[in-house]
Structure formats: C-alpha cells, structure tokens
Image: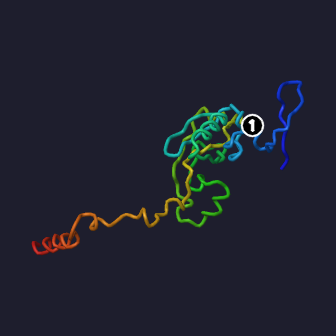
C-alpha cells in the first residue's frame, strides 16, 4: 500500500500523512459499495420495500444509505414500453447473493408490482431517463430468518401453566363426551 501526501494550503508543498489512499477517498461508502454516483442529482425512481414508490436522486440515495446503515439498494432495469415492474425476492439480493440463494424455494416469489408514474414512463420512452428502478430494502438475508435454539417458540400448551397438557386433554375429552 502506498502512503499519500496531502496539500496543506494552495501553493504549499505536500506533507506526507502516513495514511493510505483509501482514507482520502471522497466517495461515500454506499456509493462505492452499490456503484452509485454520489454527485448525480438527476431524478431516479426509488422503491422502498414495504414503503412505496418515490422519485429521488442518486445523491440523496447515497446520503440515505450512509445515514441508515441497515439499508441496502439494488437496481432493476425497467423494460422499455412497460408501465409496470414486478419486484421479486431475488431483486432484493446483491449479485453475489443471488447465486448463493438461487436454490431456495421463494427465490422467484413476487413481492410487488410497481406502476411506473406517467411522467417517468413518458420520460423513459422519449428521453431515455429512468432506466432503473432502485430498490431500497433492509440489510438481511434468507439465512437471518432461520430460527436458532434461543429464538424458537414454545408450544402453547407449555405456556399455559402447571399441568396444562392434562387440562387441555381434559377439555378435549369433555367435548367428545357431550356429543
């Protein structure tokens, strides 16, 4: 790794800092991670999973992702001549995750059907704008939803109290005897 030097004031010589080049990066971490342009203020279509559709910019999106580190973004190309975009489970995965989770049963399940606003539709058709739908979702994976030993729920009969299984059985027998 090379160390960099920094300019103290215009016209002065550079002074070595001992820091690596990566520490002098002006790019936000989300811009780098999700390949976004943090200086682009052109309008984009932004779908917040379980939230709704909005227009924003990549600049604002980077600021949101840097502020809310639990969020992630993926892009889905909007087909030309289409006024709806179907968002599926695999659209929430980053490219490297898609290959990993491809064999899961709900990989291709539908999550939402997004209607493209008419202004965005016509702008896409005639001007080539709004080529992607940016999907913001919580940072999670299918593996995070698997229950561990501590999080598994107890059966209802074990939460009713002392001798609850016997009480539950007694109630069932009483119903059969009345019939």
Where's residue 147, x and y in %?
A: 46, 64
Q: In front here: 111 or 94? A: 94
Residue nearest the viewer, comparing 35 with 154:
154
Q: Secondary structure at mark 1?
A: loop
Residue 124's x, y, as percent? Answer: 67, 37
Residue at image location 63% in from the left, 34% down from the top: 60
- Number of numbered discs visible in the structure rendering: 1
Tell me where residue 143 appears, x and y as whole percent. Answer: 54, 62
* Front one among 124 and 60: 60
Who's the residue at 18% across and 72% down the image?
A: 172
Quadrant in which residue 141 is drawn? bottom right
Coloration mode: rainbow
What residue sits right under mark 1 in the picture? 26
Residue at the (66%, 38%) spot, across then down:
130
Query: Where is 22 relative to 154, above or below?
Result: above
- Dot 1 surroundings within 10 Å: few (below 14), some, or many (20 or more)? few
Where on the picture, by quarter, is residue 58?
top right
């Amino acid at each position: 790794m090379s160390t960099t030097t920094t300019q103290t004031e215009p016209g002065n010589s550079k002074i070595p800092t001992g820091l690596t080049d990566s520490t002098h990066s002006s790019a936000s971490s989300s811009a780098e991670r999700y390949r976004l342009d943090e200086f682009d203020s052109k309008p984009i279509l932004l779908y917040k999973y379980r939230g709704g559709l909005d227009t924003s910019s990549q600049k604002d999106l980077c600021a949101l992702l840097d502020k809310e580190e639990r969020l992630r973004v993926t892009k889905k190309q909007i087909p030309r001549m289409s006024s709806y975009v179907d968002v599926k489970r695999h659209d929430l995965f980053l490219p490297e995750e898609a290959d990993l989770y491809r064999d899961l049963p709900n990989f291709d399940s539908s999550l939402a059907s997004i209607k493209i606003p008419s202004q965005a539709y016509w702008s896409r058709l005639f001007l080539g704008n709004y080529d992607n739908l940016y999907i913001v979702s919580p940072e999670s994976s299918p593996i995070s939803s698997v229950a561990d030993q501590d999080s598994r729920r107890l059966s209802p009969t074990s939460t009713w109290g002392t001798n609850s299984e016997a009480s539950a059985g007694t109630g069932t027998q009483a119903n059969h005897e009345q019939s």
